[in-house]
C-alpha cells in the first residue's frame, strides 16, 4: 500500500505467533512474529508496510528502526 510506517511493538503473544504494533497514529496493527528476523523485542521501534488481511490491516515486512530502510 505504499510508504513505510513507523510504530512500536506493544504486545507479543508467543503462543499464537502474533504481535501488536501501535503506529504513529495510535492505531493497533497486528503482525506475525515471523515477520521480524531474529528476536522480537517488546517496546522496539519498527518500520513496516501495511497489508489487508482477512481480519483487517496487518503489518508486513517489519524491520527494527535501527536498520536502514531502502528508498
Image (cartoon, rainbow, N blue to C red):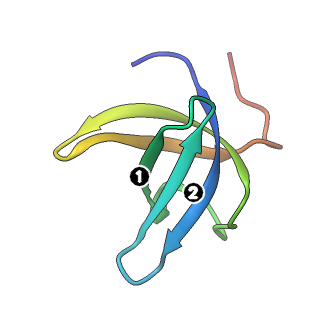
Query: Which residue of the protein is positioned furthest toward the front in this rendering?
Result: 26
Left or right of 59? Residue 10 is right
In the image, residue 11 sits, relative to residue 2, either above or below, namely: below
In the image, residue 32 sits, relative to residue 46, either above or below, namely: below
Q: Position of residue 7 (x, y in %)?
A: 64, 40
Kindly indicate whether the residue at mark 1 contacts the one at mark 2 (C-beta within 8 angstroms): no
Task: Identify the residue at horizontal 47%, vertical 80% (top origin).
Answer: 14
Disc 2 secondary structure class: loop
Q: Position of residue 46 (x, y in %)?
A: 67, 44
Which quadrant of the figure has residue 44? Answer: bottom right
Disc 1 secondary structure class: strand
The quarter of the image holding the N terminus is top left
In the image, residue 70 sits, relative to residue 13, either above or below, namely: above
Q: Position of residue 27 (x, y in %)?
A: 48, 38
Query: Which residue of the protein is positioned furthest toward the bottom in this rendering?
Result: 15
Q: Which residue is mark 1?
A: 30
Which quadrant of the figure has residue 26? Answer: top right
Task: Identify the residue at horizontal 83%, vertical 43% (top origin).
Answer: 66
Query: Which residue of the protein is positioned furthest toward the right in this rendering?
Result: 66
> Which residue is at the front of the view, 61 or 44?
44
Q: Which residue is mark 2?
A: 36
Residue 56 marker: none
In the image, residue 27 sits, relative to residue 8, either above or below, namely: above
2 or 1: tag closer to the N-terminus: 1
The quarter of the image holding the C terminus is top right
10 Å crowding of disc 2: few (<14), some (14-19), many (20+): some
The residues tagged by marks 2 and 1 sit, at their Cα atoms, a distance apart of: 13 Å
Of tags 2 and 1, which is closer to the observer?
A: 1
Amino acid at each position: 500500500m505504499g510508504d513505510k510506517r513507523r510504530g512500536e511493538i506493544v504486545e507479543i503473544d508467543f503462543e499464537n505467533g502474533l504481535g501488536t504494533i501501535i503506529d504513529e497514529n495510535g492505531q493497533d496493527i497486528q503482525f506475525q512474529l515471523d515477520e521480524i528476523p531474529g528476536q522480537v523485542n517488546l517496546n522496539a521501534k519498527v518500520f513496516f508496510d501495511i497489508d489487508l488481511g482477512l481480519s483487517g490491516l496487518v503489518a508486513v515486512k517489519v524491520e527494527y528502526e535501527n536498520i536502514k530502510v531502502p528508498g
